[in-house]
Image (cartoon, helix red, strand yellow):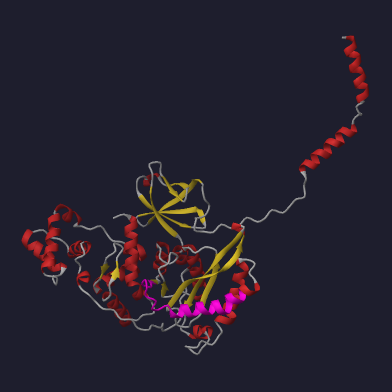
Amino acid sequence: MDDDLAEKIALHRFSVIAEAVNERLSASERGVAVRAAAGRRHSHPDGAERRYSRATIDRWLRCWRAGGLEALKPSPRADAGTVRAHPELVEEACALRLELQSRSAAQIARIILARHGVRVAERTVRDQLRRRGLHREALAVESKAFGRYEAGYANERWITDVLVGPFVPFPRTEGSVRAKLFLIVDDYSRLLVDGCFYAHENARACQELLRRAIVWRGLPNTLYADNGAPFKNAWLERTCAVLGVRLVHSKPYSPEGRGKQERLNRLVREAFLAEATHVGIESLEQLNDLFRAWAERVANRRLHAETGEAPTDRFEASSPRRAADPARLIEAFRWSVTRKVTRTATVELEGNAYAVEASLVARRVELRYVPEDLSAIEVYYEGRPAGKAVRFVTGRHTHRAVPQAAPPAPQPTGIDYLGLVAAAHDEEAGAGEKIAFRSLAGTLESTEALS
C-alpha cells in the first residue's frame, strides 16, 4: 500500500472515531458515541460503504490517542500473499455469500479452512466481498429518517459556508473580482464565529479563516461543511484530523442541518452587503474592515428570534472552551504531499527542485510545508523525520493556492536621464572654443584649387 492510500485510510478512520474523540465526553457518553458510529455506514476511500464493529472503533481510538494520525494508518497484511496465490478462494467466498446472504465473513473463512486447509483472515474475506459489491450493506435496503439537531454547548459544532459577494477593485488584475465571503457560525449560540472576504475560493482561504477562528474562539468538536472544493479536500481533512476535530460533509441534495447558516447568509445580504454596495466599495481590505465591525456590533449583539439571547451573550455564558496546543496548531495547517525521490536524491514541488538525503533515493517520502513559504520543506519517511529538503532550483516562492500580493506602485523619482545627458553635452560644447564654419569652408576651397 502506497503512502497516499495509507493517508486516505487514516483520515477515513479518524472520521469514524471523530465524534468519540471529544475530551468532554464521559465514559458512558463515549460508549454511546462509539455504538452510534458502529451502527452507521461509512464511505471508505475505495468508494464502498462500510460498517465497523465496536471493538474496531475502540482499537482505533486507542491508536489515535497513542500516536495520532500516523497510528491510524494500516499495517501490512500478513495474509496478503495467500489471496494472490489462491485466487480461486475469492471466487468460492463470493459463491458462499450469494448462496446464503446471511453468512458472515468469519463463517466463510471457517468453511474455506475446513475444505481447503488454507487459513484466510476474516478481514480479508470481508474486503474481497466488498470489492465485488457483495457486502451486507449492498444486499440490504434501509430507510433513513431526519430529525432536527441543535448543539448542546458552544463550540460543539461549527457550520461553514461561502457566500458570493459583490465585485470589488483588485490591483493584481487591474480590474475587479467577485469577493467570496467565507463564514463560520456556531450552532449552539448562532454566533458569527468569524468571516472574511477573499478574492479566491480555494482550500487555503478556508484554512486561513479556520485557523484565525480557532485562535480567537477555541477548538470546535465538529466542523460541518458542504461538498464544495474549499471544504472537500485532503488538506482540510488532515487539518481536522491533527486537531481532533470531526469533519462532516452534508450529503448532496440534502439541505438538512444548514438552516442556521442560510439564515445568517440572508442577514448578511440584507443588512450588510446591501448597505456596503450602496455606499461603494474601494477595496477588499476596506470591505473586510467594515464587515468585522458589523459582525461584532450588529450580527453578534442582536436578539436572536429562536434563542431569545444575543449570540455573544449565549456563547460567553457556555462552558469553558478548549484551546489548541500551539505546536499542534502549526502542524495542522501545514500541507502534506508524497513524492518519490529521484536517483539524484531530489524531489519536485510546485516547479521547484529540492535536494534530500542520499539514503532516501528511490523511496517515497512525505513533504510537509506551509504553502506561503516553499523555502522550508520538512521530509518524513515512514512517519519519522528525515531531514529538510534544500531548494536549489526555484520556480515559485509560494504555492499556487496562495494569492500573490500586488507589488506596490513605484514612486516617481523625477529624474530625466536623457535630459541630464543633453544638458551635459550642451555644457561641454559651450565651454570649448566655438568652431568657425566659414573659415573651414575657405580652407576647403583652397585645398581643392591646389589639387
- Compared across the picture, whether 50 is left or right of 422 comes to left
- Compared across the picture, whether 409 is left or right of 366 comes to right
Please tell me which residue lies in front, 36 or 260: 260
Quadrant of the frame with the C terminus? top right
Residue 259 falls inside the magenta stretch = yes
- Counting from the top left corner in percent of width and height, residue 281 is at 63, 69
- Counting from the top left corner in percent of width and height, residue 73 is at 31, 62
- Identify the residue at horizontal 58%, vertical 77% (top origin): 272
- Identify the residue at horizontal 46%, vertical 53% (top origin): 377
The quadrant holding residue 431 is top right
Please tell me which residue lies in front, 217 or 380: 217
Q: Residue furthest top?
A: 451
The quadrant holding residue 234 is bottom left
Please tell me which residue lies in front, 100 or 128: 100
Please tell me which residue lies in front, 116 or 139: 139
Q: Is residue 71 visible?
A: no
Q: Residue furthest bottom?
A: 308
Above or below 3: residue 180: below
- Counting from the top left corner in percent of width and height, residue 325 is at 46, 69
Region rendered in magenta? 248-276
Above or below 418: residue 198: below
Quadrant of the frame with the N terminus? bottom left
Residue 367 falls inside the magenta stretch = no
Q: Main secondary structure of the magenta part?
A: helix
- Compared across the picture, whether 281 is left or right of 350 comes to right
Q: Is residue 134 visible?
A: yes
